[in-house]
């Protein structure tokens, strides 16, 4: 594999290059007191940005840390500085360790991954010789110790405004590439920092792994639709990969391209290898669709059967009894009144952890007491509950679910409140066995009683 075949890229010649001391980064001065800190010698071709206000500055992402990015930032700016991530992927966050204050979108999987960091093994694919220009790993770079330490991010929500003094950056949530994907809107300067939601290169909608989270084409399309309203307020898209400044009208081009994939009028390229672009998929190679200036990679599973209709909705794991399946201990169901509304927006994957654990229906009522699960007659059924929870977790991971909606108060599915173990109807704070395992694995659990408010807002 040879990468790239046209290094250095010709588009950099459009920009004013800044003279800095670095063997790895190039820095370009953009309009409105923004610096692009670019990494052109790695196949990700990622761009981080230093956005300077009158009182403080913001780093939009921190790049790959092949070399210390703070050394470059310090040559450009001396005042107060914080970081905001466009999303949690490794190529945007690895230099976080050089900064104290780091903001990230409030999305459970992303926050979990930022807190845990990434191992040398997880990053190995990204720093093989072939990932660097001309197949040459920089002499100073030690791939055997390369890793991402965990950090404690400060969560932010849609509409959050960062005030830098004389300019603001507003958080615009744009899930699709990644659930936590945001853009940053600088209204005064008519700029939109796009993260990985749009740029002129390979656009990825196919990820499905713990390391990269789950992409979703349908959410991506909805994000691009939402962005159409911003076009009249913009001159430039400030892009996180490849060419740095792209005309705002490309947001319309991107939206039209995604629509043509969704309605089946776009034809996938006839290729059986997508090279480095295939990384992060769950199994088969993604489909590749080429448009003027950019390429879109789509998970084959999302495309296949749904071609010509709507693309696959985000997936949610749900307690089977809420779907009307009579799997409860008493042989009854608990059909969820909000089911129709949720089903419009999400694909529902049903599980009953207790049945998955081998318990029969109907079965003895059980409650949790001092961390173990007992039936009313005093039999310890903890093993069956934990076994079922393990299987449910594997199903959730296999489907890359966005979250789980579980029935309230169950010793398996309960979230926040469960019965106290005395079988007297008293509720205490706590989680069921499956919910506990899901939370430990960073999967958000929403009690059914709160799901409508959280998922349909
Ligand atoms: S284990 Fe969960 S899905 Fe099964 S009956 Fe109990 S609450 Fe419903």
Image (spheres, helix red, strand yellow):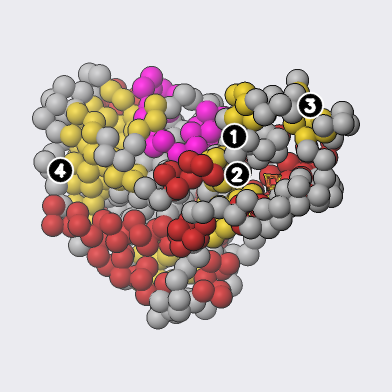
Q: Which residue is mark 2?
A: 406
Sequence-first tag of 1 and 2: 2
Q: CA distance from mark 3 to mark 4?
A: 55 Å
Q: CA distance from mark 1 to mark 2?
A: 7 Å
Q: Nearer the viewer, residue 457 or 395?
A: 457
Q: Which residue is mark 1?
A: 415
Local secondary structure at mark 4: loop
Mark identifier at residue 187: 4
Furthest residue toward front: 424
Q: Nearer the viewer, residue 386 or 340?
A: 340
User: Which callout, 1 or 4, points to the residue nearer the camera?
Assistant: 1
Sequence-first tag of 2 and 4: 4
In magenta stretch: residue 300? no
Where is residue 289 drawn, in percent x and y? 44, 71
Query: How many other residues sit within 10 Å of disc 1, few (<14), some (14-19) or many (≥20)?
Result: many
Q: Is residue 399 left or right of residue 267?
A: right
Q: Could you tell me if the residues under marks 1 and 2 are in contact, i.e. CB atoms within 8 Å?
A: yes
Q: Could you tell me if the residues under marks 3 and 4 are in contact, i.e. CB atoms within 8 Å?
A: no
Q: Nearer the viewer, residue 339 or 122?
A: 339
Where is residue 211 drawn, in percent x and y? 57, 43
What residue sits 72% from the left and 48% below the top? 328
What residue sits 60% from the left and 24% below the top? 429
Q: Could you tell me if the residues under marks 2 and 3 are in contact, i.e. CB atoms within 8 Å?
A: no
Sequence-first tag of 1 and 4: 4
């Amino acid at each position: 594999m040879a990468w790239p075949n046209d290094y250095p890229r010709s588009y950099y010649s459009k920009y004013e290059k800044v003279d800095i001391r670095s063997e790895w980064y190039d820095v370009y001065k953009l309009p409105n007191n923004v610096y692009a800190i670019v990494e052109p010698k790695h196949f990700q071709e990622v761009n981080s940005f230093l956005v300077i206000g009158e009182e403080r500055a913001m780093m939009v992402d921190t790049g790959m840390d092949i070399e210390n990015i703070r050394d470059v930032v310090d040559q450009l700016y001396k005042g107060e500085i914080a970081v905001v991530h466009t999303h949690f992927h490794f190529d945007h966050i690895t230099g976080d360790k050089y900064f104290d204050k780091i903001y990230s979108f409030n999305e459970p999987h992303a926050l979990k991954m930022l807190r845990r960091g990434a191992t040398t093994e997880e990053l190995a694919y990204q720093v093989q010789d072939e990932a660097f220009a001309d197949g040459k790993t920089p002499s100073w770079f030690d791939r055997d110790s390369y890793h991402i330490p965990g950090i404690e991010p400060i969560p932010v929500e849609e509409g959050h405004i960062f005030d830098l003094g004389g300019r603001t950056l507003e958080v615009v949530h744009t899930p699709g590439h990644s659930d936590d994907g945001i853009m940053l809107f600088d209204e005064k300067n008519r700029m939109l920092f796009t993260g990985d939601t749009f740029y002129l290169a390979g656009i990825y909608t196919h990820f499905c792994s713990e390391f990269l989270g789950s992409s979703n084409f349908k959410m991506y399309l909805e994000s691009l639709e939402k962005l159409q309203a911003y076009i009249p307020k913009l001159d430039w898209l400030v892009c996180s990969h490849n060419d740095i400044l792209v005309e705002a009208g490309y947001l319309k081009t991107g939206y039209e391209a995604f629509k043509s994939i969704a309605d089946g009028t776009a034809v996938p390229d006839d290729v059986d290898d997508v090279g480095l672009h295939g990384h992060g998929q769950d199994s088969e190679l993604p489909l590749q669709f080429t448009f003027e200036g950019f390429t879109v990679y789509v998970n084959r599973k999302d495309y296949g059967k749904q071609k010509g209709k709507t693309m696959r909705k985000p997936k949610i794991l749900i307690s089977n009894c809420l779907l009307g399946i009579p799997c409860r201990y008493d042989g009854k169901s608990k059909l969820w009144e909000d089911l129709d509304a949720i089903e419009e927006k999400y694909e529902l994957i049903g599980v009953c952890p207790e049945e998955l654990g081998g318990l029969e229906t109907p079965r003895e009522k059980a409650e949790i007491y001092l961390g173990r699960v007992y039936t009313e007659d005093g039999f310890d059924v903890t093993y069956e509950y934990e076994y079922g929870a393990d299987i449910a977790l594997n199903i959730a991971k296999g489907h890359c679910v966005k979250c789980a909606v579980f029935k309230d108060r169950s010793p398996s599915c309960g979230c926040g409140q469960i019965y106290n173990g005395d079988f007297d109807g008293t509720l205490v704070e706590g989680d069921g066995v499956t919910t506990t395992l899901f939370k430990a694995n960073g999967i958000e659990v929403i009690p059914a009683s709160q799901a409508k408010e959280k998922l349909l807002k």
